[in-house]
Image (cartoon, rainbow, N blue to C red):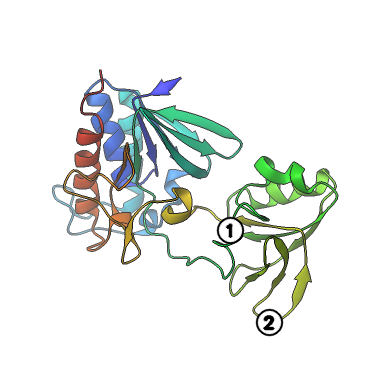
Amino acid sequence: MKYDLLIVGGGPAGLTAAIHARVRDKSALVITNEPTASPLCRAPAMANYPGLPGVTGLELVQRLVAQAEELGAQFKQGRALSVMPMGSSVMVSVENDAVEGRAVILAPGVSRAAPLKGETELLGRGVSYCATCDGMFYRGKRVVCAGDAPNFEEEVEFLRSIGCEVTVKRLAGLEILGEDRVNGVRTAAGEAVPCDGVFLLRASIAPAQLAPGLEMEGGYIKVDGRMATSLPGVYAAGDCTGQPLQLARAVGQGQTAAHFALEGVD
């Protein structure tokens, strides 16, 4: 199925975009981890959100999810691994699956994790973000897994089940070693661990790694007044586009991004 709109992220910006799409009778798929795992859901009360003084973060997210679902928005739980513009459509890989849309809105929130040393240079040459996608290439080989993805243990067990020799390490301070391909990692404590591959199983992937060629500015996705990015068919909304990191701003940008992303969609 080709959706009118794909939305990466189930926070206020992404859910607002899904609601707007459905109000316009356009199909929308929200790709997200569990929405109530958002940091916003830990907010005990918000005094500055218009019309809902004192609403908790959890209550607001639950209301947005319920509204999007009642309008017919669909949800796919999992990590988006890559975004690939392809002429008149955009493909998004989600774990070991792929979905297609006429446009995509990136609304993953703020990525606070900087790339590890060696990560960008060796991506696709021993560095992977998905065990079930790429694990078979490392069958019987030594791999290192690190991350905080909700399905981290499941991914590790999958690698072990296909014969990989798995070492689990912490992400903090990890350095990926190798010239043309990964040949090991070095931990923050200075321990060198030889390996053939590294699986960085984060809960979410930074936009620059998610969509190669995406123009960034000060660590945030650069957008124009229509919330369009430098890539065709790719829009962005919410905290990923920069300061100020405010809920009302994210909601407004989600609506704006959906409005322009759906222009011309029959």
Above or below, 214 against 191 in this view is: above
For marks 1 and 2, the one nearer the N-term is 1
Looking at the image, which is closer to me, 137 or 144? 137
Name the side, left or right, on which 78 lies relative to 175: left
Looking at the rendering, in which quadrant would you find the C terminus?
top left
CB under 8 Å between callouts 1 and 2?
Answer: no
Residue 59: x percent and y percent?
Answer: 33, 46
User: What kind of residue is marked 2?
Assistant: Ala
Name the side, left or right, on which 106 lies relative to 147: left
Residue 91 at least partly seen = yes
Mark 2 highlights which residue? 189
Mark 1 highlights which residue? 148
Q: Residue at x 61, y 36 (%)?
A: 96
Identify the residue at the far left of this view. 51
User: What kind of residue is marked 1?
Assistant: Asp
Q: Find numbered disc 2 in the image and state the secondary structure of the residue it sits on.
A: loop
In space, the residues marked 1 and 2 are separated at their CA atoms by 20 Å
Using the rendered view, name the quadrant where residue 63 is placed: top left
Residue 199: x percent and y percent?
Answer: 66, 55
Using the rendered view, name the quadrant where residue 177 is placed: bottom right
Above or below, 109 against 18 in this view is: below
Q: Find numbered disc 1 in the image and state the secondary structure of the residue it sits on.
A: loop
- Crowd rating for badge 2 (residues with CA inside 10 Å; few <14, some 14–19, many 20+): few
